[in-house]
Amino acid sequence: MSENARVLTDLVRLQAVASYDLFHPVLAAELRGVCLRTAERLGMPLAAVQAVLNTSTTALATNGGEGDFLSPLGGTPNEISMCPAVVVTGRPLIAGDLRRSDDFAGTPGVLTGLVLAYAGVPLTSESGELIGTHCVMSPEAREFSAADIDNLHIGAAEVMDILARYRITE
């Protein structure tokens, strides 16, 4: 089993993802607020909160709007998503021009011009498990500043504060 598959299929990590009521109707509205603020701060057309599962990445919320291709899809297979790389490495993925990426240049989003710039940071549960990403995407290549990445981390902290209120108790 590859290291990527081992991380993505780790039972403890998946239990951490499942410990939240991710499809609560009020949760989506709260997370959308974070996405709206992040998109505005970074000047990006699309900001999202994504849960990374074992085989797919699920869009929990986006800022909506004209550039939002994720909401209608609901998510993507992990093989063609950038977000799993963030979960596997535990580090931000910052790519100003994905056409130059050995890992992502051939993905449908890049080939069709939907996603040329991507920046994503991990969402880390209280127990330290990586459950997903807070990310931004653009059909235009662009550079990301240290302030942009700081703002993504601020958004990720907001997301985790919100998710804490939607923990499923046993």
Image (cartoon, rainbow, N blue to C red):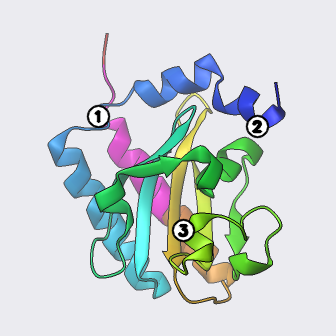
Mark sitting earlier along the chain (2/3): 2
Horizontally, residue 52 falls left or right of residue 93, namely left
In magenta segment, residue 153 = no
Q: Who's the residue at 32% across and 73% down the image? A: 36
Q: Is residue 70 left or right of residue 118?
A: left
Q: Nearer the viewer, residue 137 or 131?
A: 137
Q: Which residue is mark 3?
A: 152
Give the quadrant of the C terminus: top left
Measuring from the top left, give residue 105's x and y in whole percent. 73, 71
> In the depicted view, which residue is nearer to us: 31 or 88?
88
Q: Position of residue 85 (x, y in %)?
A: 70, 51
Q: Can residue 156 be found in the magenta stretch?
A: yes
Query: Measuring 55% from the left and 81% from the top, which residue is drawn there?
Result: 113
* Mark 1 or mark 2: whose residue is earlier in sequence: 2
- Which range of residues does the magenta coloring cover? 155-168
Q: CA distance from mark 3 to mark 1?
A: 21 Å
Q: Magenta part mainly helix, strand or loop? A: helix
Q: Secondary structure at mark 1?
A: loop
Q: Quadrant of the N terminus?
A: top right
Which secondary structure lies at badge 3?
Answer: helix
Residue drawn 28% across the image and 62% down it: 32
Q: Amino acid at mark 2?
A: Asn
Indicate which label's residue lies in the foreground, 2 or 3: 2
Drawn side of residue 132 relative to residue 104, left or right? left
Q: Which residue is mark 1?
A: 166
In this rendering, the answer to whether 163 lies above or below 45 is above
Name the residue carrying label 2.
4
**Res 95 seen here:** yes
Q: Residue 131, image x and y in percent? A: 54, 38
Q: Residues within 10 Å of mark 1 (few under 14, many from 20)?
A: some
Q: Is residue 54 above or below residue 75?
A: above
For label 2, the SS is helix
